[in-house]
Amino acid sequence: MALKHATPMLDELEKGPWPSFVTDIKRVAARKPMCEDLLGLVEMSYEHKEGHWKHGGIVGVFGYGGGVIGRYCDRPDLFPNVAHFHTMRVNQPASKFYTTEVLRKLCDIWEEHGSGLTNMHGSTGDLILLGTTTDQLEPVFYRLTHELGMDLGGSGSNMRTPEGCVGKARCEWSCLDTQDIIYDITMRYQDELHRPMFPYKFKFKASGCPNDCVAAIARADCSIIGTWRDKIRIDQEAVRAYVGGELVPNGGSHGVEKRKLDIQKEVIDLCPTRCMEWDGKNLKIWDEDCTRCMHCINVMPRALRPGTDVGATILCGAKAPILEGAQLSSVIIPFMKMEPPYEEFHEFVEKMWDWWMEHGKNRERLGELIQRLGLREFLKAVEVQPDPRMVNTTRYNPYIFYDPADVPGGWERDAKSFRERHHA
Ligand code: HEM
Ligand code: SF4
Ligand code: SF4
């Protein structure tokens, strides 16, 4: 059917095999004028090669300081239906498992109050309802909470919506109940999520193992990554089946046809610590040297499994480049048991926040504060002892600070007594 605006450039993007967002939006535009105008506006942006949203936008729901990202088009004269085009972040269930019943109800609500467009999901994890007007925010919020028992997610200088990998729900490698951990953090820190009280944003993510399928180490100020501290469980029979070509390596990721695994070349020689040995019959792992990189387990999932003494490594500080450069999280707690009610973890989180809320500058991420005041100060604040596992390598420069309490005699020196021994 004919839409209001001509979109010759966008139309090009209906070609090709990938699901076309243009085709999808057009389908909704047939019944939603907001989408019609959105297509027109985006076409204009393609033409001008610049965005056509005004700067910023502050809207929300009463009681909360975040959760809605306000947005206004800069040509409401041409595209009045997207004069307001706010985004609502809805807190997704951990790992994004849904029933069709929930999704249908959500769609009904959004069909009535919004553009009908969504983002499934935002990078942080939220279910994104894309485009509505200010007067619809409270009604959507009312219906989400009253009809679905769902709440808004986070935005602003607060705890953002936490997310985890599929974990134990569908993965044999998970050392953590990621859904439970994420749900626990989300519920315990609802206040911190809904009402910004921090120097800047703060994110949690939990992965069940070091494969890190939610990319916690790169995208969370506090990354929770599952690990184990006992031995990798080996089924020697199954290892021989891989070597004999009965089992397909890597679960078939590199081709599902049966072939012999060259265990020496594909596993032993690729182990980063060279702590494995294959004698032609049995696989030996010197677990004391294993860094739990997951490689051998990834190649032979039917033969090798993580140990049973499981927990998490807690890492802190990841962030994108602005201001002081991109960071991955650094190890702060090499191993922590993660079992309900997660008291040890909560204590850590609250000490970490106390320190950052007190010392963090305006719009300074935790990673930058650690850089500015030093890992030593952070460790003191969270009452964690320094550990060699926290560093890649020791420092090369000798500009080492000492605590005067650790130095015999302290810093108070008397020049006169020095001069008695060293005449000027
Ligand atoms: C009481 C005695 C000394 C004092 C107060 C002193 C103080 C300093 C200071 C303040 C700096 C500048 C550091 C910086 O800019 O970051 C410096 C640099 C330096 N000092 Fe000393 N110094 C003393 C003795 C010595 C001695 C005995 C040597 C050599 C035998 C020495 C060799 C150097 C060198 C090579 C640098 C330059 C390092 C660099 O910039 O890479 N200093 N010193
Ligand atoms: S991070 Fe590990 S446990 Fe989680 S889904 Fe990926 S492989 Fe499985
Ligand atoms: S998990 Fe990694 S470090 Fe450990 S034995 Fe396997 S390949 Fe080696």
Image: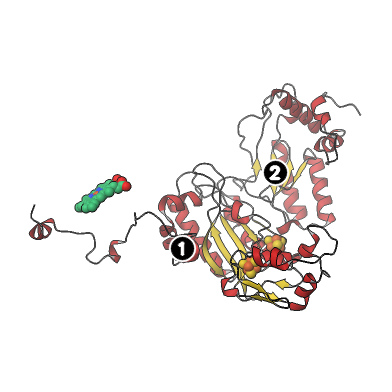
Q: Work out whether 65 lies above or below 102.
A: above
One can see residue 179 in this view = no
318 and 28: which is toward the camera: 318
Q: Work out whether 85 lies above or below 189.
A: above
Q: Position of residue 43 (x, y in %)?
A: 76, 27
Residue at 41% x, 59% y is: 376
State the separation of the CA atoms marked 1 and 2: 35 Å
Residue 13 is left or right of residue 229, and the answer is right
One can see residue 119 in this view = yes
Badge 1 density bin: few <14, some 14–19, many ≥20, Cα 10 Å: some
Q: Amino acid at mark 2?
A: Met
Residue farthest along the top direction in this orientation: 77
Count of number-bearing discs? 2
Q: Position of residue 223 (x, y in %)?
A: 59, 58
Residue farthest along the right direction in this orientation: 1
Badge 2 density bin: few <14, some 14–19, many ≥20, Cα 10 Å: many
Q: Work out whether 365 lies above or below 376.
A: above
Residue 206 is left or right of residue 322, and the answer is right
State which quadrant residue 94 falls in. bottom right
Label 2: which residue? 88
Disc 2 under 8 Å from ligand 2? The reply is no
Residue at 74% x, 30% y is: 82
Label 1: which residue? 382
Quick check: which quadrant has ligand 2? bottom right
377 and 146: which is toward the camera: 377
Residue at 57% x, 65% y is: 313
Q: Position of residue 231 (x, y in %)?
A: 63, 76
Q: Position of residue 185 (x, y in %)?
A: 61, 61
Q: Amino acid at mark 1?
A: Val
